[in-house]
Image (spheres, helix red, strand yellow):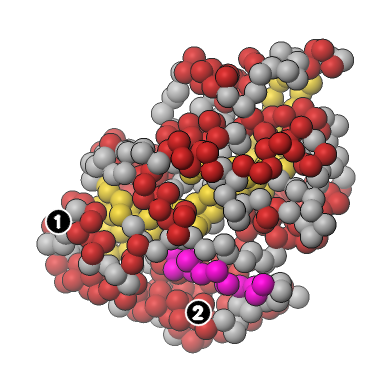
Amino acid sequence: MQTPRRMAAALAAVATSSVLLLSACGGSGESDASAQGGPVELKVNLFGTFGYQELGLFEAYEAQHPGITISYESTQDEDKYWPALQTRMASGSGMADVQGIEVSRIADVVANQADQWTDLRDTPAADAIGRYIDWKEPAATTPDGAVLGLGTDIGPMGMCYRTDLLQQAGLPTDPTELAAQMPTWDAYLALGERFKAAAPATTAWADAAGGIYDAMTSQLEVKNYDKAGNLIFDSNPDLRSRFDTAAKAAQAGLTAKLEQFADPGWDQGFSSGSYATIACPSWMIGYIKGKAGDGGSGKWNITSLPGGAGGNWGGSYLAIPESSEHKTEAAELIAWLTAPEQQAQLFAKVGNFPSTKEGIAQVAGTTDPYFNGAPIGKIFSDSANAAPIQVLGQQDGVIKNEVSQALLSVETAGVTPDDAWNTAVNNVKNQAG
């Protein structure tokens, strides 16, 4: 998932009977709780929309495992979820049996909290550990080999765009033709200049400079930390050059000057047409559908990122706190929820792209009528396969927020890119200690 932070998407109701077809996949009812000494209540605490509740997967699991009941709680904003989780962990009470961990937090968990989480090698989830794409499992693995989480989704990137707005500005609307005119990010901005010259002043080329930066840096192998774990955010020239490119878009008036997920105008823009393009991870498909509604069907389409490059933004893990009194049952649940069959179903309904190799193979041919029949399975599969194995760092989430705020200050307050960058660097250093 969001990551960035995964926000709730408006989902179509799915009949429980259709979900029960998954009963042959990833679980067989062998963990009948009543046969193990009585009923068991599993508490699941997540953030945003993982899709499990919305698609009836919890109900399906309960039907297959008599004696198991699932108590589910979700916090919309991961930025609120994570501090609350840390408070509960420090107090030693209030932790659920299954907790979600966003990808930008996993390095911190592995480095500093390993003793607070269950090593899944010692649980029924052990057999599920090896089914992921190459970089997903290692990110949740400690130096001594303990595996602290099972991967849910990943966030391969594409470029979502409003076909009606591009057509009105005289730009190509066919995904292949549009991609051909965006061989680089500089070409993407140049195309934005053409759009700006022909479009109404109320419509921007892109939603936010911060979103452009996130997309560009999602394509880097080494970003905020080097492979030895050293913070290099302030000295990595690849980051500064991408910051300057995003700031250039802001200064040129190509962005709608909106803060992603925090500004109501950003949500409204999906339907109102206040911006024409947005770099979108796969999980954002469901979000766009929810915000644009039925009126947006056929107006949106998807192509690859500039240059056809791969990238990843987001993705999460399911983990079991060491304090759980039901580790066996919790491990069986997360192994089932993250099985390829369930991941494929979630992508089809929500846009959460599989992190398992088999799940990716199952969705490769998926198309989406809402997005003009776009071959979303191929677009996001290609992006996932081309994405680098990115070095994750303990303060990635903090850095992302600081850079987003810095670029927002360029957009809305006229702060120079140099001053904005220096503010971000100083804030990161203060928080990173």
Relative to 234, does residue 270 appear above or below in the rendering? above
Relative to 407, does residue 56 appear above or below in the rendering? above
Find out whether residue 327 is within the magenta segment: no
Look at label 2 and name its amino acid.
Asp
Label 1 or label 2, whichever comes before in sequence order: 1
Residue at the (55%, 69%) spot, across then down: 221
Image coordinates for residue 182, horizontal then vertical, percent: 27, 67
Image coordinates for residue 45, horizontal then vertical, percent: 68, 38
Residue at the (83%, 49%) spot, across then down: 116
Badge count:
2
Q: Secondary structure at mark 2?
A: helix
Residue segment shown in magenta: 215-227
In space, the residues marked 1 and 2 are separated at their CA atoms by 34 Å
* Residue identified by numbered label 1: 167
| Of 252 and 134, the residue lying toward us | 134
| Of 274 and 213, the residue lying toward us | 213
Find out whether residue 221 is within the magenta segment: yes
Residue at the (53%, 30%) spot, across then down: 341
- Mark in the foreground, 1 or 2: 2
